[in-house]
Image (spheres, grey):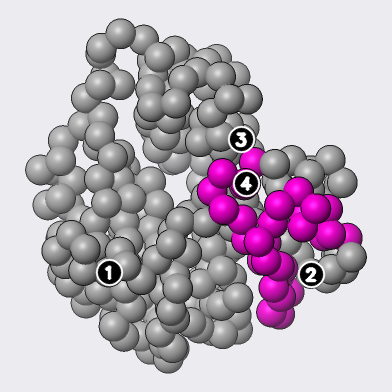
Amino acid sequence: MSGHSKWSSIKHKKAIVDSRRGAQFSKLTRAITVAAREGGGDPDANATLENAVRKAKEASMPKDNIERAIAKGTGEGGEADAIESVLYEGYGPGGVAILVEALTENRNRTSADVRHAFAKNAGNLGEPGSVAYLFEKKGVILIDSAAYSEDDLMVAVEAGAQDISTEGDLFEVITEPAGFTPVRRALEEAGIAMDSAEVAYRPTTLVPVDEAHAAKLMRLIDALEDNDDVSAVHANFDVSAEVLERVAG
């Protein structure tokens, strides 16, 4: 567990608020469309699509919007074929490694925008492979540790969770990508509320960052996430929850 997980929780809550204002609907729609294109339009058989639809519902996206996004992804040709997944790699303030996931129909535009965000916020966009080796793709579920005990989360272990750790006020449940949906469903069926649940690039090593660098780093992450083409940002920083709350405020 690290400050990175705490920041993920903070950003997740902020994203839901923003989505209700309509600011994130285009990102959510694009994620659903690409997931449906790549894995089919049945959420029960496509874990990526199920996750994208769940996030859209959390953001109060209308059912009709979700269904249109799925139909666009499963349809012939059109906009869905023009959207591609791109992974950008770079370094932020304090030597923090950053992975940026994007869904775009114009790679040149997105690359220029991402490069500008890095340069303007004390970061550097790197070459492919420069930091990706520092991350692994895992299912990550965050749960309020003040509301539940480890015994309450044994259903996650029984459903296939790899690990459960705790620090401060959060439990972090880790799964393999393929095991994410069964574990999340088991927690839901047990009535466990989750702060966030997603398949994400999780850092294998962490870089301690002081408050001054943390503030600059969060500005960079915010700038990247504000880009309409960016679907997720991952970083390997380790900062105390107290510092994150201050810089997030």
Residue 212 visible in the displayed image: yes
Q: Which residues are magenta?
A: 152-181
Quarter of the figure with the N terminus: bottom right
Residue at (38%, 27%) from the top-left corner? 38
* Residue picked out by circle 4: 179
Which amino acid type is shown beneath numbered disc 2?
Ser
Secondary structure type for disc 3: helix
Say whether residue 22 is visible. no
- Tag on residue 70? none
**Which residue is denoted by mark 3 in the rendering?**
54
User: Which residue bears the numbered disc 1?
Assistant: 131
Q: Say if mark 4 contacts mark 3, CB within 8 Å.
A: no
Q: Amino acid at mark 1?
A: Val
Task: State how far apart marks 4 and 1 are (Cα).
Answer: 25 Å
Residue type marked 4: Gly
The local secondary structure at tag 4 comes to helix
Q: Nearer the viewer, residue 164 or 149?
A: 164
Q: Earlier in the sequence, mark 4 or mark 1?
A: 1
